[in-house]
Image (spheres, helix red, strand yellow):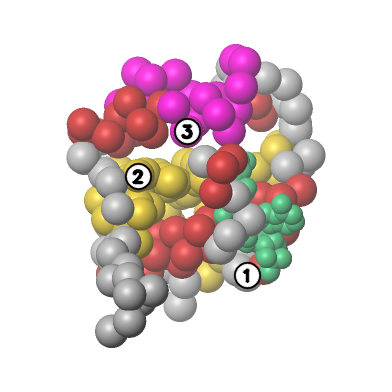
């Protein structure tokens, strides 16, 4: 080894289940993705993460959490719902959202779900592009969806994908 050849540390990227102590980081990412009053509150996220029928996955590089995904489902139901997927804006458009979504779908499948469904603001073109790319198709339009959820105003589209 020459003097210029340094040993590079291996920085591990991984996707794993979130723990309750990740809540602060998850909330920070949510606030960055949805500034103002448009996002979930910390309490809502805590509820979603800790609920028995929820799956929360995080994507990490070393100790830095860069993204999270929350899925909710009913026992013995074939349909799982993607509640949200958020990639820290610093790390967006690098393939993280795609990997996380694919892992989420694989996890749903392992747990017996056969359909993945989600709602997305009809103005969220990057998210819609991601969902279309991974095989989600339009199911229906829901007017004032975010207004009724107190997440700002706007219509949503519901999209669905077969996991068979
Ligand atoms: C939507 C989101 C999850 C995508 O995650 P990401 O890591 O940035 O996306 P990826 O790099 O994995 O890109 C996957 C695909 O998404 C689409 N996409 C994502 N970001 C894009 C951008 N800035 N411009 C154009 N297309 C984009 C493209 O189809 C892309 O595929 P391509 O690179 O082959 O063109 C991320 O942008 C995000 O967290 N946004 C804010 C929160 C949000 O809106 N969540 C969705 C709630 S329903």
Mark 1: give few (<14), some (14-19) or many (20+) Cα within 10 Å. few
**Residue 113 spot, x, y in % from top left:** 36, 64
Residue at (43, 46) in percent of width and height: 66
Helix, strand or loop at mark 3: helix
Q: Give the vertical position of 148 relative to 137 (above or below).
A: above
Q: Nearer the viewer, mark 1 or mark 2?
A: 2
Residue 107 appears in the figure: no
Q: Earlier in the sequence, mark 2 or mark 3?
A: 3
Quadrant location of the C terminus?
A: bottom left
Camera-near label (2 vs 3) is 2
Q: CA distance from mark 1 to mark 2?
A: 29 Å
| Mark pair 3, 1: CA separation | 26 Å
Identify residue for label 2.
Answer: 64
**Segment colored magenta:** 28-47
Above-or-below relation of 105 to 46: below
Q: Residue at x 61, y 22 (%)?
A: 35
User: Is residue 151 in the magenta section?
Assistant: no
Which residue corresponds to mark 1?
135
Image coords of residue 50 (percent x, y): 24, 34
Place of residue 80 in the rendered image (x, y in percent of width and height, measured from the top left): 42, 54
Whether the magenta-drawn stretch holds residue 42 is answered as yes
Judge by depth and name the residue closer to the eye, 85 or 63: 63
Q: Which residue is mark 3?
A: 29
Prevailing SS of the magenta stretch: helix
Which residue lies at the image location 36% right of the left edge and 31% below the top edge?
25
Give how far across and how far down residue 98 sits, in percent. Answer: 54, 63
- 51, 13: nearer the viewer: 13
């Amino acid at each position: 080894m020459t003097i210029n050849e340094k040993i590079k540390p291996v920085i591990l990227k991984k996707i794993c289940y979130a723990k309750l102590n990740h809540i602060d980081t998850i909330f920070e990412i949510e606030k960055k993705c949805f500034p103002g009053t448009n996002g979930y509150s910390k309490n809502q996220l805590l509820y979603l993460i800790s609920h028995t029928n929820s799956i929360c996955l995080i994507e990490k590089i070393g100790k830095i959490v860069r993204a999270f995904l929350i899925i909710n489902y009913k026992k013995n139901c074939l349909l799982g719902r993607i509640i949200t997927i958020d990639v820290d804006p610093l790390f967006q458009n690098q393939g993280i959202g795609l990997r996380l979504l694919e892992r989420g779908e694989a996890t749903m499948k392992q747990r017996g779900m056969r359909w993945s469904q989600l709602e997305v603001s009809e103005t969220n073109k990057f998210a819609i592009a991601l969902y279309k790319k991974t095989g989600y198709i339009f199911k229906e339009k829901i007017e004032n969806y975010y207004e009724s959820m107190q997440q700002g105003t706007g219509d949503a589209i519901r999209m669905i994908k077969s996991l068979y």
